Image: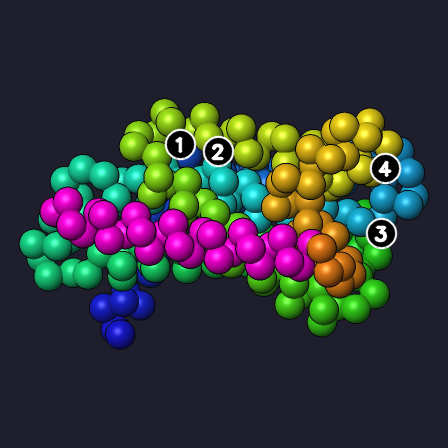
Amino acid sequence: MKAFRKNIAVYYKINFRNVFLFISSYLMPIVFYLMFSAVFVSISEENKKTIIRSMCLFAITMNSLVGLPGNVIQYSVGDINRAYIIGGIRLWHVFLSIAINNMINSIVVCTLIILTAPVFFHAALPASLGYFLCTLLACIVISTLIGIVIGMVCKSDNVAIIVSQCLFLPSIFLSGIMMDVSILPSVMRKISNIFPLTHMFVLTDRIQQVSAIYISCITVVCLVVVIHRYRKIIISQ
């Protein structure tokens, strides 16, 4: 257990030594939060009610879909995983450490947003803060799981970047965190329901049965894919 905690600490320090991970995990989400929160508040006072939810989910998505997959690929493809296996280190410890590290990054940025948004932008805290924090934590876990799936399925960084961006960009613009879904054309509203972020945005505000079922199904599918890919990685060694 001590070695496992040390492994998590090492991966966390890597965030500040790896420029790409630092930008995708901390710098980009924070800069985006500061810039777009100022823009959203200047456009409409109503946006003060959704800034915290929107910016937290953006930070989580940025961490999990942009920064995480490439990190996972390093240990699922190539010689690094063989070195771990030869050294007697179980590979699932490595993937779990990466996942926990990503969750910590997301929690740190979300905490910063929740604490500073009311001060900087007079943002309104969610009506039920306890419910919001619980659903936000669930979103962090699920988004991390999706990022791990992308990293495990893709064979190279280039493929992972394409897949991540194909999921990340439409999610940001169609999920409702950037603009109200109701102003989108009906076709785009239907397409937006494909992306998990759309349902996460709904669930952080209120319980909706359809969104809860969809997210539950996505979670199960991701778990099945992760287990299947992990077994293939172990067998290939």
Query: To which residue does mark 2 refer?
Result: 164
Q: What numbered label is drawn on residue 49?
A: 3
Query: To which residue does mark 1 refer?
Result: 160
At label 3, counting other C-alpha atoms closer than 10 Å, the crowd grade (few under 14, some 14-19, many 20 or more) is some
Start-end of magenta stretch: 211-237
Task: For marks 3 and 2, give the CA distance.
Answer: 29 Å
Name the quarter where the N terminus is drawn.
bottom left
Task: For marks 4 and 2, give the CA distance.
Answer: 26 Å
The verdict on residue 221 being magenta is yes
The picture places residue 66, in percent across and down from the top left corner, at: 48, 37
Q: Amino acid at mark 2?
A: Ser
Q: Secondary structure at mark 1?
A: helix
Task: For marks 3 and 1, give the CA distance.
Answer: 34 Å
Of the numbered discs 4 and 3, the one sitting upstream in the chain is 3
Of the numbered discs 1 and 4, the one sitting upstream in the chain is 1
Q: What numbered label is drawn on residue 182?
A: 4
Q: Amino acid at mark 3?
A: Lys
On the question of residue 112 being in view, the answer is no
Q: Nearer the viewer, mark 1 or mark 4?
A: 4
Task: For marks 1 and 4, give the CA distance.
Answer: 31 Å
On the question of residue 141 being in view, the answer is yes
